[in-house]
Image (cartoon, rainbow, N blue to C red):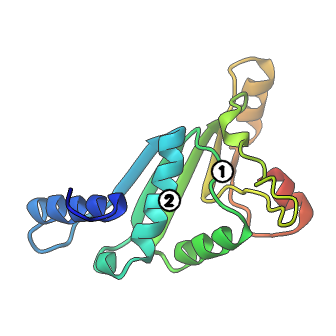
Amino acid sequence: DTGLSKMDEIFEKIEQIGKEVAPDGDYKLCITGHSLGGALATLCGFYCGSKPRFAHLSTIYIWTFAAPRVGTQAFIHAYQYLERTGRIRHARFSCTNDIVPLIPFCNFEYDDLQFYKHVGMRVQLHDTGKVGKWRLRNNLDVTYPLKHDWPSEIRR
């Protein structure tokens, strides 16, 4: 046991591999995950983007597939700040009929009910049935919510 948290062990490994790949420290960091791994990739990307130890890196790229929601409103604001400043870029892929991206809905705390939300740019993949083909022909289903009003929150 090194005495480090798992996140610090991951950070150490990222720096070690980054120095092997680019001794000058100018390497790109791309994080990806599917389902629960997508949720962890979102959190890892957020932490990497906010830690001073990775400030020398340009944009950190995150690609997630069928990931569940990971944060409440405060997390969204912090995450979008990192996106606005160019620290992170996140593309979130999901399928129309997949239930995993729809959970968890809220924290179920009676005295402090908060709703979980998605972050990043959503790329929605549709079935190849008639409706799915029509949707793909008529528009590219990519969204990035910038508003925090009720209709935007419901679509998130």
Q: Is residue 32 above or below residue 117?
A: above
Q: Which residue is mark 1?
A: 69
Q: Which element type, helix, strand or loop, lies under badge 2?
A: helix
Q: Residues within 10 Å of mark 1 (few under 14, many from 20)?
A: many
The residue at the point 47 percent across, 43 percent down is 37
Q: Quadrant of the rendered structure where residue 149 is?
A: bottom right
Q: In this rendered view, identify the residue nearer to me: 136 or 9.
A: 9
How many numbered dots are placed on residues in this image?
A: 2
The residue at the point 80 percent across, 70 percent down is 147
CA gap between label 2 and label 1 equals: 11 Å
Q: In this rendered view, identify the residue nearer to me: 6 or 96.
A: 6
Q: Which element type, helix, strand or loop, lies under badge 1?
A: loop
Q: Position of residue 141 (x, y in %)?
A: 70, 44
Q: Which residue is mark 2?
A: 43
Q: Are marks 2 and 1 in contact (CB under 8 Å)?
A: no
In the shown orientation, is residue 36 left or right of residue 152? Answer: left
Q: In this rendered view, identify the residue nearer to me: 87 or 16.
A: 16
Toward the top, the furthest residue is 129
The residue at the point 73 percent across, 25 percent down is 133
Q: Amino acid at mark 1?
A: Arg
Q: In this rendered view, identify the residue nearer to me: 152 or 72.
A: 72
In the shown orientation, is residue 149 left or right of residue 9? Answer: right
Q: Amino acid at mark 2?
A: Leu
Tell me which label, 2 or 1, sits earlier in the chain. Answer: 2
Q: Position of residue 6 (x, y in %)?
A: 34, 57
